[in-house]
Image: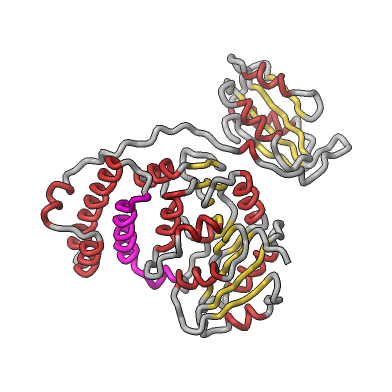
Amino acid sequence: MPSPLVSVIIPVRNYERYIGAAIECVLAQKFTDYELIIVDDCSTDRTPEIVAKYVDGRRVRSVRNETRLGQFPTHNRGAEHASGKYLKFFHGDDIMYPHCLEMMVMLMEAFPAAGLGISYNPWPWMAPHLFSPLEAWQAHVAGQTGMFSEGPSGTIFRAEAFRRAGRFADKYHTGDSEMSLRVAMEHPVLLLPLGLWWYRIHGEQIRAYVSLDTHIAEGMMWMKCLLSDRRNPLPKNQKAQAERRLIRDSCRLVLNRLWRGKMQAAWSIWRSCGLSWANTGVVLSARRTFPLIPVEVRSGWSVFPGKPSVVPSAHAYPSVSVFIPAYNAEEHLAKAIESALAQRFTDWELIIVDDASTDRTGKIARTYADGSRIRYFRNEANLGKWPNHNRCVELARGKYIKFLHADDL
C-alpha cells in the first residue's frame, strides 16, 4: 500500500469530551490522501474507548503510550509512526474545517522549498507568501509578526524538514514554537491563509495548568539558545541586537514580577535568561535598535492550482453576484478583478460599479468587461460609498451577493 501524502497526528490525553469531534473533522476533509494516527498519552477517562470506535487498522490507527510521556514527547511518538510526506499535528480538542488539509497540502506542493507552513495573519503579508529563513527570523525578532507562536494545529511540516531539525523539545511547554523556529533556520517558511481550523479554549487544556510566567521563562530560555545556534540565519549584528533586546525585556519582566510580589516568577525568569546585575542597568534604559524590515506586500495568490469546483450556470442567473464598488481605484482594481477571476468556484457574475471616478478606474474595468459575465457600469454623478453599494445590488442576478472592495483580494 503506497504511503499517504499526509500523516495527521493527534496526541491526546483525557479529552473524552472533544476527541470524537476532532477525529470526525479529519474524516470529513475534502482532501483524502492521508493517514490518521492518534497517540493516547495514558488517558484515564473514556478517551481510549472513543478512539477505538474509529480505528480501522489502515487509514485510522491508534497508539497508546505504556507510561505517560508528556505533551511533546507524545507528538514525537506520533511522528515515529508517520509515513506521509507531510506531518500535520492536530490537538484532540481542536477542529479542522473541511478545506483545511486541501488548502495546506495544495500550497505546500506549490511551494516545494517550504519546510513549514503556518496558518496565520501577520500584517502586512498576504498568504500565500514564502519567507526565506533570514526573512522569517528577521520578521520574528523584529517583533512584527508573532507567527511562530502558532500552535501545532495551525502548522504543517514537510516530514523531511521536521526530521532534519530533530524532535520537539521534550521539556518545554512551548516546544511547538521552538521547533518551528528550528525548522525556519534551514528551510523557507510558507505563510498559509487564515480560517483553516478552530482553536478551542477550555478549562481542561494543558495551557490551563501551566502559568504564563512558566511560558515566558521557557520561551526566553530557548530563544537565547536559538540565537546562539550556528545555524541561525541572522547576521552577527542582528543576533547581537536581538540578544540585547531579549535581556532588556527579561529584566523588565523581572522588575514587573518583583513589583507585583511574584518572587518565584521573577527568579524563574532571571535564572532562565542567565541575567546578572552587571547588565541590567544598561539594558533597562536601552532603546529598541533593531531595524524594521522593509515591507513589500507580495503574495503567491496567483499560484493556486486546481480545477474549478463548480461549472458555470448555463442560464442567465448565476449563484453569486460579486460586486466591486469602485472610486478612483486605478492602483488596485486590476488585482481585485483578477482575484475574482482566479476563483475555483466559477458560478458567478462580476459587476463593477464606478462611482464617477476621475482616474483610470473606468479604463481598467472596461478591459475586463465582456457584457455578460463581467459587467461594468459608471454612475453619472458620484453617489458616495454606501449608495454605490446599493446600486450594485440593484444590478444583481445571483442568489447570493458578495461585496469585494476594489483594494482587497
Taking the magenta stretch, the answer to whether it contains residue 36 is no
**Going 32% across and 41% down the picture, which residue do you hit?**
235
| Residue 324, quarter of picture | top right
Range shown magenta: 206-231
Seen in the picture, residue 139 relative to 91 is either above or below; the reply is: above
**Going 45% across and 77% down the picture, which residue do you hit?**
69
Task: Specify the farthest residue to the right.
Answer: 314
Q: Residue 156, can we see it? A: no
On the image, the x and y values in percent for residue 34 come to 67, 62
In terms of depth relative to the viewer, which is nearer, 206 or 394?
Answer: 206
Seen in the picture, residue 377 relative to 321 is either above or below; the reply is: above
For residue 96, side relative to residue 260 (left or right): right
Q: Which SS type dominates the magenta stretch?
A: helix
| Residue 110, quarter of picture | top right
Q: Residue 215, can we see it? A: yes
On the image, the x and y values in percent for residue 189 come to 50, 47
Seen in the picture, residue 388 relative to 238 is either above or below; the reply is: above
For residue 352, side relative to residue 327 (left or right): right
Q: What is the quadrant of the C terminus in the image?
A: top right
On the image, the x and y values in percent for residue 135 come to 42, 41
For residue 279, side relative to residue 13 (left or right): left
**Going 78% across and 23% down the picture, which residue do you hit?**
370
Q: What is the quadrant of the N terminus in the image?
A: bottom right
**Going 51% across and 72% down the picture, which residue do you hit?**
77
* Rendered image coloring scheme: secondary structure
In terms of depth relative to the viewer, which is nearer, 171 or 151?
Answer: 171
On the image, the x and y values in percent for residue 218 come to 32, 63
Taking the magenta stretch, the answer to whether it contains residue 212 is yes
Counting every numbered tag in the picture gives 0
